Each structure stands twice: as structure tokens, then as C-alpha cells.
Image (spheres, rainbow, N blue to C red):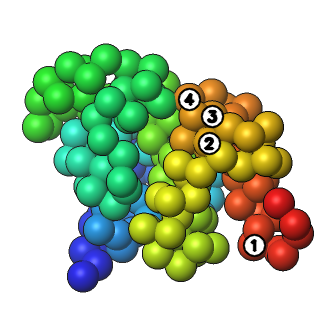
């Protein structure tokens, strides 16, 4: 069941604007958001609850997420309920959310996309896509391969 969640942006310029997203996590419709909305959310910081909602919609565990986000597992666990993550972590979470939303769209289910993330992909130098998500360049490569699959290009 999808849960509708609202994200308030704390920007003087966009005060009062609300971005809505349906997800077993908050960030599912991220591909429809403008860059301005994403920037506002990054500046505000992703809340712990938003992070947990995102985590629920993936097959990633805390160890995977800590490695990908470049933080310790304790950082993810110990964030207070009303705390917000740094801009760097928030931006990576948003980028991951975009990758997962697109992957689910192309592969049809979370399970099929998760299996693909754990597979050796020749077009990625026989690396698993999950191994490349810890850098912006790796995220770009994974998105490019998903796009190729979406458009039927042999990958």
C-alpha cells in the first residue's frame, strides 16, 4: 500500500510550497520533482523518518547504505527522530531515491531491480551496480545502464 507523505521545504524563496510523493517511502516520485525542489530538500536535510521510509522501499541494509552514503552505520542509527542529515548525505539519498524509482519503473518490481543490482553487469565492467553507487560517477553509470535497458539497448 502506498503512503502519501508531504515534504515541507524550508526555503525563504519557496516558503509554504509542498512536494508530495507516494512511496512505501517518501521519495518515490522524485523523478517528477524540479531541481529547485530537490535543492530545497537537500538544503533542509533529509529527516531520519524520510531516510527510514526510503530504506523500507529498498533491499539495502544499514551496512550497504553506510558504505554508499560514506558514513558510519552508527551515524544512520543514532540520528535522532527529529534530526536531519547533512546536505551531502541528503543529496546522496535523493540521488539513490531517483535511481531506485527509475529501477523499479524499468524492472517492474523492487525484487527484480534488487536482483539486478546484485548481478555482475558486463556493461559495468563485470561489476555489480550496487558496488558503484558510492560515487556520483558510479550513480551516473548505473542510471545510464538502466536507461539503456529502458530503451531496449543491449546492455
- Pointers 4 and 1 in contact (CB under 8 A)? no
Q: Secondary structure at mark 3?
A: helix
Sequence-first tag of 4 and 1: 4
Spatial CA span between label 2 and label 3: 7 Å
- Quadrant placement of the C terminus: bottom right
Frontmost of labels 2 and 1 is 2
Residue for badge 3: 132
Spatial CA span between label 3 and label 1: 19 Å
- Pointers 2 and 3 in contact (CB under 8 A)? yes
Residue for badge 2: 128
- Pointers 4 and 3 in contact (CB under 8 A)? yes
Q: Position of residue 127 (x, y in %)?
A: 68, 38
Examine the rendering and report whether any part of residue 107 can be seen.
Answer: yes
Residue for badge 1: 150
Identify whether 21 is placed above or below 117.
below
> What residue do we see at 84% from left, 75% from top?
152
Determine the image quadrant of residue 56. bottom left
Kindly identify which numbered label has been placed on residue 134. 4
- Left or right of 126? Residue 88 is left
Label 2: few (<14), some or many (≥20) within 10 Å?
some
Q: Secondary structure at mark 4?
A: loop
Q: Position of residue 71 (x, y in %)?
A: 37, 19
- Left or right of 38? Residue 127 is right
Amino acid at each position: 500500500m502506498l503512503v502519501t507523505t508531504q515534504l515541507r521545504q524550508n526555503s525563504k524563496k519557496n516558503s509554504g510550497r509542498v512536494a508530495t510523493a507516494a512511496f512505501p517511502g517518501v521519495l518515490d516520485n522524485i523523478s517528477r520533482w524540479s531541481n529547485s525542489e530537490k535543492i530545497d530538500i537537500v538544503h533542509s536535510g533529509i529527516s531520519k523518518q524520510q531516510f527510514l521510509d526510503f530504506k523500507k522501499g529498498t533491499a539495502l541494509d544499514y551496512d550497504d547504505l553506510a558504505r554508499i552514503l560514506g558514513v558510519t552505520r552508527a551515524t544512520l542509527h543514532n540520528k535522532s527522530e527529529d534530526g536531519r542529515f547533512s546536505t551531502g548525505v541528503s543529496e546522496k539519498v535523493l540521488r539513490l531515491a531517483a535511481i531506485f524509482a527509475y529501477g523499479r519503473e524499468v524492472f517492474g518490481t523492487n525484487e527484480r531491480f534488487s536482483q539486478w543490482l546484485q548481478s555482475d553487469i558486463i556493461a559495468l565492467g563485470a561489476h555489480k551496480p550496487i558496488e558503484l553507487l558510492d560515487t556520483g560517477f558510479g550513480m551516473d553509470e548505473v542510471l545510464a545502464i538502466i536507461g539503456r535497458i529502458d530503451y531496449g539497448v543491449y546492455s
